[in-house]
Image (cartoon, rainbow, N blue to C red):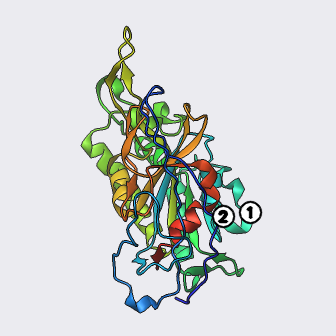
């Protein structure tokens, strides 16, 4: 890989609100999330080295070379509710390419930078696999893949993974199978047309998830083996918190997970280096990026930051224009 120069963006000052209810006091923290400088001899890098540790919540001064980069491909999951800005978020880094599974989700990408699919296509997984195999044959130039048209691809966006998962459930049930049991059993006709992510509400037995994973597992593995960063986009999953009707007090905490369940979700969770959630914070009146495991809105958040790169657990969404490029800069591949 040839050395490249990362343009240092202007640091964004954000505050983390530590309050769990509107009445608690907040502790503001100024945060900087600068890119890692890429000016060292790559042969000196360790296989899995965490960049310079942070002093408090503030990282090293912008532009200061980091002693090591992480030798790994920085796969990441971006999750959140519909319309919150996930696809726009994935478009902000340079030279992205999209597998547009959500029938228009990739509108942020022009035709030369995406493959588009019909989310209801019974051969959806097969067609995606064919395109993934095609991409693996592209010429390699350092961190980039080069298409036959000369388009440079630095990272791949899969938008949206739970739509692909729903399609796999539909294909499973179309073989005459039912998923779930008792009152929750669903046939092919009942699964068809479910909103994205709602299939997670279907109670599926272990053998059901095993069958679904037999369809999804090889595809996920193939996508991750292309050799460039993969950004998996999903809708949010999990359960809302439950409250006592009379007192309004918390009865049971909820959870916030990416909208891909079962063995396939576990596979993705284990193989990516980060899982972030984009959420609308009603107390702040704006969107936030949740980057670490935490309790948010009385829900346990299953974010992931394997290398402790992100300086705080919450960032303002206004930082989205620099987030992915900065995240990528901490890795070499």
Where in the figure is residue 267, as x and y percent of width and height?
34, 58
Residue 207 against residue 47 in the figure, above or below: above
Mark on residue 110? 1
Q: Nearer the viewer, residue 43 or 107?
A: 43
Where in the figure is residue 280, as x and y percent of width and height?
56, 38
Could one spot residue 130 in this view of the protein? no
Residue 114 against residue 105 in the figure, above or below: below
Could one spot residue 124 in this view of the protein? yes
For the point 36% across and 18% down, which residue is it? 249
Q: Nearer the viewer, residue 52 or 178?
A: 52
**Badge 1 element:** loop
- Position of residue 16 in the picture relative to residue 304 (left or right): right
Q: Nearer the viewer, residue 238 or 98?
A: 238
* Numbered marks: total: 2
Q: In the rendered structure, are the residues bearing label 1 and label 2 in contact, judged by CB atoms less than 8 Å apart?
A: yes
Mark 1 surroundings within 10 Å by alpha-carbon count, few (fewer than 14), some (14 through 19), many (20 or more): few
Mark on residue 114? 2
For the point 39% across and 35% down, which residue is it? 299
For the point 68% across and 81% down, which residue is it? 148
- Find residue 113 and report its image quarter: bottom right
- Find residue 174 and report its image quarter: top left
């Amino acid at each position: 890989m040839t050395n490249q120069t990362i343009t240092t963006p202007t640091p964004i000052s954000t505050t983390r609100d530590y309050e769990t209810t509107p009445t608690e006091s907040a502790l503001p923290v100024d945060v900087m999330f600068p890119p890692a400088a890429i000016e060292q001899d790559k042969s000196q890098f360790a296989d899995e080295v965490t960049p310079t540790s942070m002093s408090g919540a503030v990282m090293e001064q912008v532009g200061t070379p980091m002693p090591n980069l992480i030798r790994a491909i920085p796969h990441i999951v971006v999750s959140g509710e519909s319309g919150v800005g996930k696809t726009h978020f994935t478009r902000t880094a340079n030279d992205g390419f999209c597998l547009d599974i959500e029938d228009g989700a990739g509108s942020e990408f022009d035709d030369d930078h995406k493959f588009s699919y019909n989310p209801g296509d019974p051969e959806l997984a097969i067609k995606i696999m064919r395109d993934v195999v095609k991409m693996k044959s592209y010429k390699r130039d350092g961190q980039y893949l080069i298409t036959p048209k000369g388009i440079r691809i630095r990272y791949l966006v899969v938008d949206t993974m739970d739509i692909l998962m729903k399609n796999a459930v539909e294909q499973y049930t179309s073989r005459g199978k039912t998923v779930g049991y008792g009152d929750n059993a669903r046939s092919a006709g009942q699964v068809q047309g479910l909103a994205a992510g709602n299939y997670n509400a279907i109670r599926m037995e272990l053998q059901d998830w095993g069958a679904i994973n037999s369809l999804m597992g090889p595809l996920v593995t193939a996508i991750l083996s292309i050799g460039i960063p993969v950004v998996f986009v999903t809708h949010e999953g999990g359960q809302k918190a439950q409250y006592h009707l009379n007192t309004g007090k918390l009865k049971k905490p909820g959870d916030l997970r990416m909208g891909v369940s079962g063995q396939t979700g576990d596979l993705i969770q284990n193989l990516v280096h980060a899982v972030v959630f984009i959420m609308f914070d009603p107390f702040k009146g704006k969107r936030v990026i949740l980057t670490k495991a935490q309790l948010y809105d009385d829900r346990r958040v299953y974010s992931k930051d394997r290398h402790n790169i992100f300086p705080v657990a919450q960032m303002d969404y206004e930082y989205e224009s620099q987030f992915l490029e900065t995240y990528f800069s901490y890795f070499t591949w």
